[in-house]
Amino acid sequence: MNESRTAKAGAGTATAAARQQDSDTTAAAGASPGADGQLVEFYRRMVLIRKFELTADQMYKRAKIGGYCHLNLGEEASVVGLMEALRPADYLFTNYRDHGYALMRGMDAGKVMAELFGKTSGVSKGRGGSMHMFDTGVRMLGGYGIVGGQIPPATGAALALTYRGAPGPDAEAVMCQMGDGTTNIGAFHESLNLAAVWSLPIVYVVINNRLGMGTTVEKAAGEPELYKRGASYRIPGVRADGGDVLAVRQAATEALDQAREQRLPALLELMSYRLRGHSVVDPARYRSAADLETAQEADPVPALRARLIAGGALDEDRAAEIETEVDGEVAAAVAFAEAGPDPTPDQLFDYAYATPVANAPTALPGDRMVVLP
Ligand SMILES: Cc1ncc(C[n+]2csc(CCOP(=O)(O)OP(=O)(O)O)c2C)c(N)n1
Ligand SMILES: [Mg+2]
């Protein structure tokens, strides 16, 4: 791994740093056994996201998880490819469909599950929940529940980076992930405009799963080829196959390099599918059987498994072994989440205000919140 990159990457966790090193070494080796080994590792990561999400779905239905809960099912190749392109020193902002990003960025699976359970052992002490995975240690600055809410702060972070250092191959960059429906929000257009006029090191990534809740892209967007939506700000756009982990990594790496070296913002559209409803409580009855079948046929997890087996990089036994190992990892995450303590009522207002609010948990409507001396 490049020395200066490692040094700059100080904030990354051991996991993220190890991942970076692993891929750098493999890329440097260039030989096909290395490339095969790397793809097998990507398969393992995609299986981790898949099994984590299926388990989160079960846990929600057992009322272990409350509130909103949106899953990355069908988007695993995009998540893994993007996080592989992002360096530990870069910053990440996402929407509420964020569990896979948190895991791949290097957050501990147990702490992510505990966050879903609302336990104080969660990454945000159980206060953020599913939609607000946040950890400055791995430079993931949310997890946003408001559609488009992540775009202005991500753009602001990119502006801050321009004050912090010069552009170059080791400079830091920002990645801002969102869904297709989000490109209709005003904040998207305002932010892209500023990124263009200020020449910011940011890559806007649109996961085009073809649906915003129950509304198709064609019904919602005046320009449904979303990568073209940066054109009015002269931001170059690229569309890639979100089901192909290598294509995603390649497109994201090129966009990030351009952002760090030339401070040119970019728009990357990843074509993918949402395998389930918008959130875990949505039966998605608005979807036709044919549409669902198309999505299932494009499922990137079995597709990569089949490709690896056909190419000889994996056999059935090794694939099954990986899947069993991941089952163990997810079961351990659930056990960790189960064992964690619930916050107590007296902690209700902890972290809610910058200054103490006296007696607030017992205040009645009309009572003064702060009694001044
Ligand atoms: C400002 C705002 N408006 C509406 C909502 C309700 N809402 C939540 S997700 C969503 C659809 C977003 O779709 P998309 O951007 O395609 O992301 P996806 O869920 O497909 O990942 C809507 C309308 C919200 N959370 N915030
Ligand atoms: Mg969508």
Image (cartoon, rainbow, N blue to C red):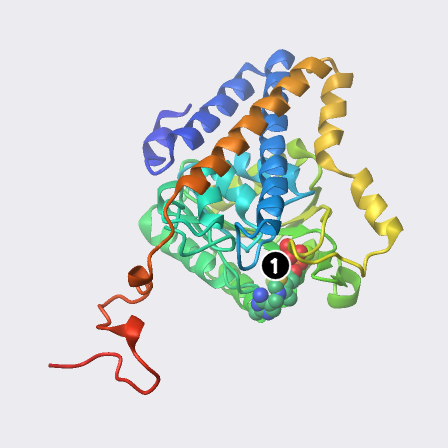
**Label 1: how many residues lie within 10 Å, few (<14), some (14-19) or many (20+)?**
some
Q: Nearer the viewer, residue 183 or 75?
A: 75
The answer to whether 346 appears left or right of 232 in the picture is left
Q: Quadrant of residue 6?
A: top left
| Residue 322 % position (x, y) | 61, 21
| Residue 120 % position (x, y) | 36, 49
99 relative to 7, above or below:
below
The answer to whether 188 appears left or right of 364 in the picture is right
Q: Nearer the viewer, residue 114 or 293?
A: 114
Looking at the picture, which amino acid does disc 1 mark? Arg
336 relative to 60, above or below:
above
| Residue 147 % position (x, y) | 57, 64
Q: Residue at x 66, y 57 (%)?
A: 281
Asked whether residue 161 is in view, the answer is yes
Locate the C terminus and report the quarter of the image it occupies: bottom left
Within the displayed image, which quadrant is ligand 2 positioned in?
A: bottom right
Disc 1 target residue: 234
Q: SS of the residue at dot 1?
A: loop
Q: Residue at x 45, y 37 (%)?
A: 110
